[in-house]
Amino acid sequence: MLRSLYSGISGLRSHQTMLDVTGNNIANVNTTAFKASAAQFQDTLSQLTKAAGGATPTAGGTNPAQVGLGVQVAGISTNFAQGSSQATGKSTDLMINGDGFFVTALGGETLYTRAGSFEFDSSGRLVTPDGAIVQGWGAVNGVVADGGATGNITLPGGAIVPAKASNAATFSGNLPSETAVGSTLVRTVDVYDNLGSSSQISLTFTRNADGWNVGKSDGTGPSLALMDDGAGGFSNSTETLKVTSGTGKEITLNFNEVKGFAEMNTIAGKATDGNEAGTLNSYTLGADGTLVGLFSNGEQQAIGRIALATFVNPGGLEKAGSSAYRATFNSGGAELGTPGEAGLGSLTSGALEMSNVDLSQEFTNLIVAQRGFQANARIITTSDEVLQELTNLKR
């Protein structure tokens, strides 16, 4: 049989594969974080019809004569170029700005994906649309231990941040300089004990000829004299006043932010530490992958951090469906790290990565594949006509 017939068949098969790859790219033009593929061709083994001849003193060398036996698909590569950003406004939608992959667990298998369309399930776990659980590191008392074994990223619905005792409070604002000598202003500040119970410290500011005298309203404990510096401030405002709260705990009061201009009476105090116990109200996801809980007492505390993975050879990853990949021998092992580290990229909340399929390139490839298929079909037709002529030699 004619070798061209089989060359044409191999061409049909290879171009059919190219059509399949191109069609899949076009079908996934709107798939979140989809990475386009491309087929590469190579020739098959060539048949030697005449070997090469070496040069002699009386004759020149000759080149080998070979007839190719067709084409085959050398490989199908994946283009991991960054896709465009699509804003969604949904806090659990995450986009990787860089080369990293989200780490997920499904059915005991570790998979990797760049599609960051996540949700919290009924157990508070952060999951993909097909139920794979996003992996990362948990936090203990607001501190995330990076670098250890990863686990499920979970939002604990009944989380409670413990109470913390107050140790200091700061007064800020303005004491009006035109206040008559002997006049008083009373201000209170709320502080907490280690069980979260609140109590008030009441201070009385008494105007004198040189400034203001500050002390507890009940007259117990020490006092502090704030001396006018003539420029709207107090020369000794950096000094602190230590008083005892209603729970018996010593509180350090700071006045370094207090001013003494005219026509303003805005002096107020606020505890700089300490809080009552609080329950989880909401959450945010930061660019470094940290899940931060917002509690009813105003506290913010880290709950966990999403892990990202990178590979020496991302092209060696095997597509596992559902926009996920699994590691192979040629991809190398996953190197885990936190978002923002070199080579991993940062996260953008409220956005998704779009497909990197270039439709203009894909439609051009579609035309090339179609014409290549037609040309190889013509090879088969022509070879058939030659065989027909051979059979017609004997009539």
Image (cartoon, helix red, strand yellow):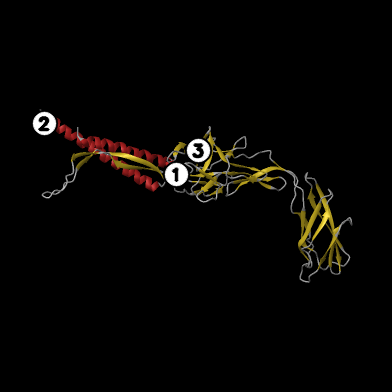
SS assignment at label 3:
strand
Q: Residue at x 61, y 39 (%)?
A: 154
User: Residue 35, can we see it?
Assistant: no
SS assignment at label 2:
loop
Q: Residue at x 14, y 33 (%)?
A: 389
Q: Position of residue 361 (x, y in %)?
A: 37, 47
Q: Is residue 332 left or right of residue 140?
A: left
Amino acid type at mark 3: Leu
Q: Which mark is residue 111?
A: 3
- Can you say whether 299 is above or below 132 in the image? below
Q: Earlier in the sequence, mark 2 or mark 1?
A: 1
Q: Which mark is residue 62?
A: none
Q: Position of residue 314 (x, y in %)?
A: 44, 44
For disc 1, the marked residue is: 314
Q: Which mark is residue 393?
A: 2
Amino acid type at mark 1: Pro
Furthest toward the bottom, the residue is 230
Say if mark 1 contacts mark 3, CB within 8 Å: no
Amino acid type at mark 2: Leu
